[in-house]
Image (tube, helix red, strand yellow):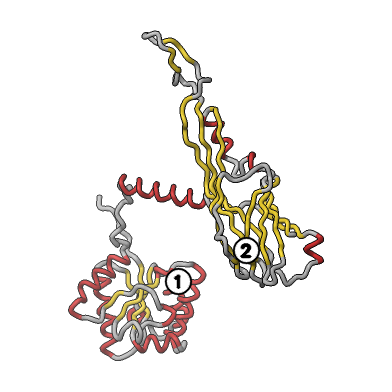
Amino acid sequence: MNPIIKSPKVFISYAWDTEVSNSWVKKLATDLRNQGIDIHLDQWMMVPGDRMALFMEKSVKENNYVLIICTPKYKHKSENRIGGVGYEGDIMTAEVLQDANPRKFIPILQTGDMNTAIASWLSGKFFIDFTNTLHYENSMDNLMRTVLNLREPEPPLGQIPAKYRQEILEMQAKQEQAADENVKIESTVIETATVKKADKNRPFLEADLIWHGSSRSPRGYSNKNPTEIDENGQLVTVIGGGVKPIIFWDLGWRFDLTIYNNSSYPAFNIQIESIGTASFASLGKLEKINNLKPLENLQLKAEFRDFVEDVHTAADEILSHKIPEKLEGMILKISYLSENRSGFCTLVKIENNKLINIEK
């Protein structure tokens, strides 16, 4: 039993032009019908007395495909809405907008080029080029495969090779780490009554703290781990057996302390000193002779270190805080001079996991 293959219904829209052009359209239609394509062509289907508008509407709407024979004359009539071509253009553009089926309309370039023969409403659509008579058979094969839905499908999607996947995962991890390690600590600014009464023609220095990451490094096993006597009579530490070992952990946090001059006046002879009980383990040094221009900033590297004797999960819990608990209450005094050598200062304080700038 032979399976039934349904022939696609195809309408040809074209501009009546020269006898040669009309004959070319008729030949194309004949060649397609000879290969099983159910072509609807006005030269065969219209007779005196038929309503042309109704024929065009039904042909555009009821056929599976519409071949648009593109010539300079077709472009002119379509864009200027002249005659049957103009009317068909209105029907086709409306159907594209309503049904979102742009593949139904296939531009066929007969004469001219894409600039002179393809109507603006078809601009950018993939067309089949029939302008070279020597390539007629190739173009016909292309058209047949299109209306029969025999275009070559894409091959199955394979897996990215393992070596590339590993590189992708490593790159993604680095990107995630970079995104996670540039966190600005929440901050606020407090102006004291002295500042509010002072001359506003002065510099105002404020600070931000940027967290760049934290880490732990093992410094040996704790003597709090269980012990036993080995076969040589030696006391040894028991590690493993599903028990997390207790380790001496060196904990570290990395920051940038960024100082901004949020004013229109330069600041001179900037000095920073820690006046609280808590302090950074290290803080970058300023030049002895320095100044900070209006609306500019400077950055100093800062580190804090801690030490814990516990299992690794306890160390990780401590490190999960971008501001270590032992930095709570830290106060930095930033002193500076104005152009007329008047002295000012900003107190930078860590309080409740926030950075507070107190201008004095």
Q: Is residue 131 left or right of residue 255?
A: left
| The disc label shown at residue 194, or none | none
Q: Amino acid at mark 1?
A: Lys
Q: Is residue 204 left or right of residue 253?
A: right
Q: Residue at x 66, y 57 (%)?
A: 334
Residue 337, located in which quarter of the rendered image? Answer: bottom right
Q: Are marks 2 and 1 in contact (CB under 8 Å)?
A: no
Q: Residue at x 55, y 47 (%)?
A: 282
Q: The residue tagged with tag 2: helix, strand or loop?
A: strand
Q: Is residue 306 above or below residue 244?
A: below
Mark 2 Cα shell of 10 Å, populated few (<14), some (14-19), many (≥20): some
Q: In the depicted view, which residue is nearer to us: 169 or 68? A: 169
Q: Residue at x 30, y 68 (%)?
A: 37
| The disc label shown at residue 61, or none | 1
Which one is closest to the eye, mark 2 or mark 1?
A: 2
Q: In the depicted view, which residue is nearer to us: 184 or 98? A: 184
Cα separation, mark 2 vs mark 1, equals: 82 Å
Q: Is residue 45 above or below residue 167?
A: below
Q: The residue tagged with tag 1: helix, strand or loop?
A: helix
Q: In the depicted view, which residue is nearer to us: 54 or 212? A: 212
Mark 2 = which residue?
Answer: 269
Among the two numbered marks 2 and 1 on one chain, the one whose residue lies closer to the N terminus: 1
Mark 1 Cα shell of 10 Å, populated few (<14), some (14-19), many (≥20): some
Residue 176 coordinates in the image, percent (x, y): 48, 49
- Residue that protrudes farthest toward the left in the picture: 134
Residue 204 visible, this orientation: yes
